[in-house]
Image (spheres, grey):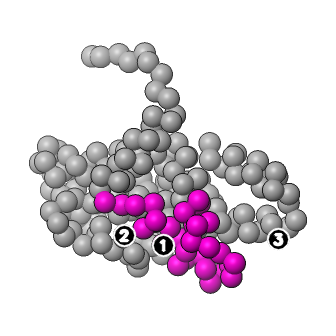
Amino acid sequence: MTTYSNHIRSKEVENAARECLEKRGVSISSIAEIVYQMQKPYNESLTFEYCVESVNRVLEKREIQHALLVGVELDQLAEKGQLSEPLQSLVAQDEGLFGVDETIAFGAALGYGSISVTTFGHLDKEKIGIIKQLDSKEGGQCHTFLDDMVGSIAANASSRIAHRLRDMEDGLSDHEIEMRDQEERY
C-alpha cells in the first residue's frame, strides 16, 4: 500500500475541481445562469456578474471541491466501463433508485443552510439549464454525479446570495459580510 505524506495544497484541489467542470463542458457562467434565474425574483438589483462571483466563491469551499472530484471520477470510470458490477450498470444507467449521486450533492448543499437544501431539491426535480443538458445522456458521456453536483453548486451560490442580501438589509458592513462569507467557505 502506498503512503502519501505530501500535503495537497487547497489551491491545487480547487484548480482540479474547476478543471473537472471545464473538461466536462460546464462553464461557471452556465451555473451562474441557473443562480440568476433562481434569485432574480427575490433581488431586483441582482446582476449576472454577481451570480458568477457567487459561483466562484462556492467553488472555493473544500466540501464542494471534494464532492465534485469524487463524482466526476465515478462518472468517468463508468464511461470507461471500469467500475465493478452492479455499480457499473447503476452509474452508467443513472438508475433512478441509486440515489448516491443525490446524497453526495445533497451533503455538499448543506454548507449554505436550508435555502440551499430546498433549492437543490427544486433543481434536482426541475433540471434547469445546464443541469437538464447533463441529465439528457446525449453525447455518450455519463453525468450521473455531475448533474447533481452542478445543482448543488448552483443551490449553494443562490443561498449565498440570499444570505448576503439579508445581511445588507440588516445593515451589516461590507467587512462584516465578508467575514461571514469567509467563515462559510471553510
Q: Magenta segment: does it hold 33?
A: yes
At label 2, the amino acid type is Ile
Residue shown at 45% from the left, 34% from the top: 12
- Does the image show residue 39? yes
At label 1, the amino acid type is Ile
Q: Position of residue 102 (x, y in %)?
A: 39, 60
Question: Is residue 122 toward the left or the right of residue 182 in the image?
Answer: left
Residue shown at 37% from the left, 54% from the top: 21
Q: Which residue is mark 2?
A: 131
Residue shown at 65% from the left, 75% from the top: 46
Q: Which residue is mark 1?
A: 34
- Name the main secondary structure of what is drawn in magenta: helix
- Dots 1, 2 in contact, CB < 8 A: yes
At label 3, the amino acid type is Glu
Of callouts 3 and 2, which one flags the residue occurring earlier in the amino acid sequence?
A: 2
Q: CA distance from mark 3 to mark 2?
A: 31 Å
Question: Is residue 73 toward the left or the right of residue 33 in the image?
Answer: left
User: Which element is circle 2 on?
Assistant: helix
Question: Is residue 75 toward the left or the right of residue 34 in the image?
Answer: left
User: Which element is circle 1 on?
Assistant: helix
Q: Which residue is mark 3?
A: 169
Q: Quadrant of residue 125?
A: bottom left
**Within 10 angstroms of label 1, few (less than 14), some, or many (20 or more) residues?**
many
- Does the image show residue 99? no
Q: Magenta segment: does it hold 127?
A: no
**Within 10 angstroms of label 3, few (less than 14), some, or many (20 or more) residues?**
few
Q: Position of residue 32 (x, y in %)?
A: 50, 67
The N terminus: image quadrant: top left
Residue interval drawn in magenta: 25-54
